[in-house]
Amino acid sequence: MNKEKKRESLSYLLEAANKIFGEKKLLEMLVSEGAPKDKNLKEIVNDEKLRFLHLTMALKNSDIFLDHLQTRLKEMSAIAKIIEVGNSELIDKWLSDECKPCLVEHVIEGYDEIYKILIELDDRLLWHGWPLIGKLHDPIE
């Protein structure tokens, strides 16, 4: 991956993690995993020493993140079973693993299964006809 693409990807991931943890907590988590110190998020994303591994390890060691991930995976599996899409059995297998930090690895390795479910939900729930109904209620002049 070239430097610009890496920086762009890390920036996106750090922004998402920042929304969950806040900048102060996120920086503490990253530094505890060996990321560069004494920097804010904008500075740290431009530091050549920052690695995806720092963020991955920080998330794997965060009970808050793992609890949220576990909850979302349970919900996704239940929905996948109901609408009969994706591989809900695989998600259930991940959830049955006693190693909670391993959930992060499972999701990274099997993200294509998660993605299939998300795309199907998008297709079924975000119907392109909804804006038409809104326009009938409150037409734009």
Image (cartoon, helix red, strand yellow):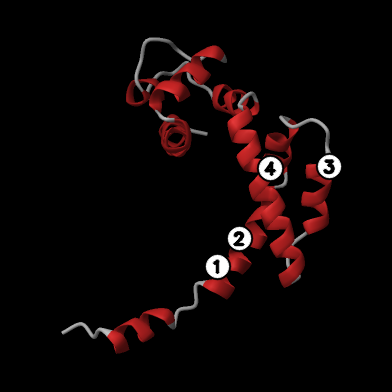
Distance, label 4 to label 1, CA atoms, is 21 Å
**Residue in view at x 77 percent, y 50 percent:** 91
Q: Amino acid at mark 2?
A: Leu
Cβ atoms under marks 1 and 3 closer than 8 Å = no
Image quadrant occupied by the C terminus = bottom left
Residue ID for mark 2? 118
Tell me which numbered mark, 1 or 3, is placed earlier along the sequence. Answer: 3
Tell me which numbered mark, 3 or 4, is placed earlier along the sequence. Answer: 4
In front here: 67 or 109? 67
Q: Amino acid at mark 3?
A: Ser
Tell me which numbered mark, 2 or 3, is placed earlier along the sequence. Answer: 3
Assess disc 2: are there few (<14), some (14-19) or many (≥20) residues with their C-alpha within 10 Å of its C-alpha: some
Assess disc 3: are there few (<14), some (14-19) or many (≥20) residues with their C-alpha within 10 Å of its C-alpha: few
Tell me which numbered mark, 2 or 4, is placed earlier along the sequence. Answer: 4
**Residue in view at x 74 percent, y 69 percent:** 82
Distance, label 2 to label 3, CA atoms, is 21 Å
Cβ atoms under marks 2 and 1 closer than 8 Å = yes
In front here: 113 or 102? 102
Residue at the bottom extreme of this rendering: 136
Residue ID for mark 3? 96
Distance, label 1 to label 3, CA atoms, is 27 Å
In the rendered view, tell whether residue 111 sits above or below residue 29: below
Residue ID for mark 1? 122
Residue ID for mark 4? 70
| 87 on left or right of 58 | right
Query: In which quarter of the view is residue 104 placed?
Result: top right
Query: In which quarter of the view is residue 24 placed?
Result: top left
Distance, label 2 to label 1, CA atoms, is 6 Å
**Residue in view at x 45 percent, y 37 percent:** 5
Tell me which numbered mark, 4 or 1, is placed earlier along the sequence. Answer: 4
Assess disc 1: are there few (<14), some (14-19) or many (≥20) residues with their C-alpha within 10 Å of its C-alpha: few
